[in-house]
Image (cartoon, rainbow, N blue to C red):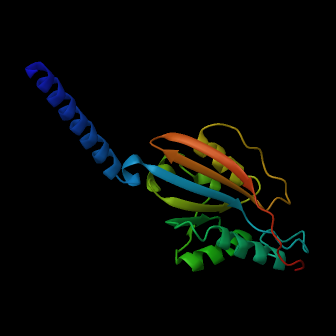
């Protein structure tokens, strides 16, 4: 009988120790785990009326898509927005920037130090606006493999999501159609 009480006491003690460990783990915040999420998009539809213009603005449809991206990202509390210094990219980021009250930061795709970029954005949710060639290239650098090829020149609806959790990287590509107004 005495042995049964000792064993029962040990079981109860181990149970409470196990519960205490679980409680401590559940009290940790997501930031303790190092979760960083990056949303990569290409600029919206650009004005193609002047083939010599290297820095065109968006068409009406592009402006509609930029607003659509802001709606899609409405439930994501972003910490930063990066864009290249081209009109079509900054105009694409503008509705999200205004809606979430975030000052856009500019980047030069060829000058990105990927490890520094990851460190600067640790535990953040970040939107990056680029181009048909730079967006998949940036994603490939983030995931550490040559997985995505340049986008079709008329693909303005792809979003790549890269998530890094404690150094483990996951990625996906989503396609969003847009019933944006036609025209320029």
Residue 65: image x %, image y %? 76, 72
Q: Quadrant of residue 127?
A: bottom right
Q: Residue at x 58, y 75 (%)?
A: 97
Q: Is residue 13 above or below residue 180?
A: above
Q: Nearer the viewer, residue 125 or 84?
A: 125
Image-based side of 129 in relation to 150, left or right: left
Image-based side of 3 in relation to 75, left or right: left
Quadrant containing the N terminus in the rendered view: top left
Q: Residue at x 46, y 50 (%)?
A: 35
Q: Is residue 57 visible?
A: no
List the single residue furthest toward the front: 1
List the single residue furthest toward the left: 2
Number of numbered markers = 0
Q: Is residue 113 above or below residue 180?
A: above
Q: Residue at x 48, y 45 (%)?
A: 165
Image-based side of 173 in relation to 104, left or right: right
Q: Quadrant of residue 2?
A: top left
Quadrant containing the C terminus in the rendered view: bottom right
Q: Is residue 85 above or below residue 108?
A: below
Q: Residue at x 15, y 30 (%)?
A: 9
Q: Quadrant of residue 19?
A: top left
Q: Nearer the viewer, residue 17 or 118?
A: 17
Image-based side of 3 in relation to 148, left or right: left
Q: Nearer the viewer, residue 90 or 163?
A: 163
Q: Nearer the viewer, residue 71 or 83?
A: 71
Residue 68: image x %, image y %? 72, 72
Q: Is residue 34 visible?
A: yes
Residue 167: image x %, image y %? 47, 40
């Amino acid at each position: 009988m005495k042995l049964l009480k000792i064993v029962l006491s040990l079981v109860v003690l181990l149970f409470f120790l196990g519960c205490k460990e679980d409680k401590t783990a559940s009290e940790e915040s997501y930031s303790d785990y190092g979760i960083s999420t990056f949303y990569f998009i290409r600029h919206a539809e650009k004005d193609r009326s002047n083939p010599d213009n290297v820095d065109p603005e968006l068409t009406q449809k592009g402006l509609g898509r930029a607003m659509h991206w802001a709606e899609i990202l409405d439930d994501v509390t972003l910490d930063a927005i990066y864009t290249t210094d081209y009109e079509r990219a900054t105009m694409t980021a503008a509705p999200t920037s205004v809606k979430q009250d975030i000052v856009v930061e500019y980047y030069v795709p060829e000058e990105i130090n990927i490890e520094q970029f990851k460190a600067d954005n640790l535990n953040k949710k970040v939107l990056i606006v680029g181009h048909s060639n730079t967006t998949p290239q940036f994603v490939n650098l983030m995931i550490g493999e040559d997985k995505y090829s340049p986008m079709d020149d008329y693909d303005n609806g792809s979003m790549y999501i890269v998530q890094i959790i404690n150094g483990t990287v996951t990625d996906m590509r989503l396609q969003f159609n847009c019933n944006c107004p036609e025209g320029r």
